């Protein structure tokens, strides 16, 4: 049985991974595989969880990708600290 098509995503921000302040906004877009949806998004920094907002308008993406929903954008406001090492994004369907 073939695997389901993978989701597609892109990070618009941060522009680089050398934050200059403790506040770090992670944003971009996420297009789930056909038949899936993104109902919730969270960012984790070294295990600390930060709630995100998914379903934000991205008309640029909908125009460029035929099956992309208009509301595929996301953002998560996080706090980083000296020595933070791992940023992970979790999405829930």
Image (cartoon, grey):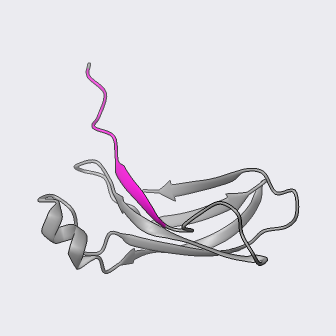
Classify residue 88 as left or right of residue 72. right
Q: Is residue 52 above or below residue 43?
A: below
Q: Residue furthest top?
A: 1
The one of 79 and 48 positioned closer to us in this rendering: 79
Left or right for 69, reference 29: left
x, y percent for residue 92 = 48, 57
Looking at the picture, how far across and down is residue 33, in whole percent? Answer: 28, 48
Specify whether 19 is left or right of 3.
Answer: right
Name the residue at 40% across, 58% down.
10
Name the spot of residue 73 as percent of width and height, x first.
38, 72
The furthest residue to the right: 82
Quarter of the figure with the C terminus:
bottom left
Q: Quadrant of residue 50?
A: bottom right
Q: Quadrant of residue 15?
A: bottom right
Residue range highlighted in magenta: 2-12
Q: Is residue 23 above or below residue 92?
A: below
Residue 27, image x and y in percent? 49, 71
Q: Which residue is found at the position 85% from the left and 67% from the top?
A: 81
Q: Is residue 15 left or right of residue 35?
A: right
The total of numbered circles placed on residues is: 0
Q: Say which quarter of the image contains residue 49.
A: bottom right
Q: Which quarter of the rendering shows the N terminus?
A: top left
Q: Is residue 92 above or below residue 57?
A: above
Indicate whether residue 9 is drawn in magenta.
yes
- Vertically, is 93 above or below 72? above
The residue sitting at 78% across, 51% down in the picture is 85
Residue at point 57%, 68% (across, down): 14
């Amino acid at each position: 049985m073939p695997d389901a098509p993978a989701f597609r995503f892109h990070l618009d921000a941060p522009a680089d991974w050398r934050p200059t302040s403790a506040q770090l906004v992670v944003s971009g877009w996420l297009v789930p595989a056909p038949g899936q949806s993104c109902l919730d998004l969270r960012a984790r920094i070294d295990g600390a969880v930060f709630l995100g907002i998914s379903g934000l308008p991205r008309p640029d993406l909908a125009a460029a990708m035929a099956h992309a929903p208009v509301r595929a954008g996301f953002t998560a406001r996080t706090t980083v600290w000296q020595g933070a090492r791992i940023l992970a994004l979790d999405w829930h369907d």
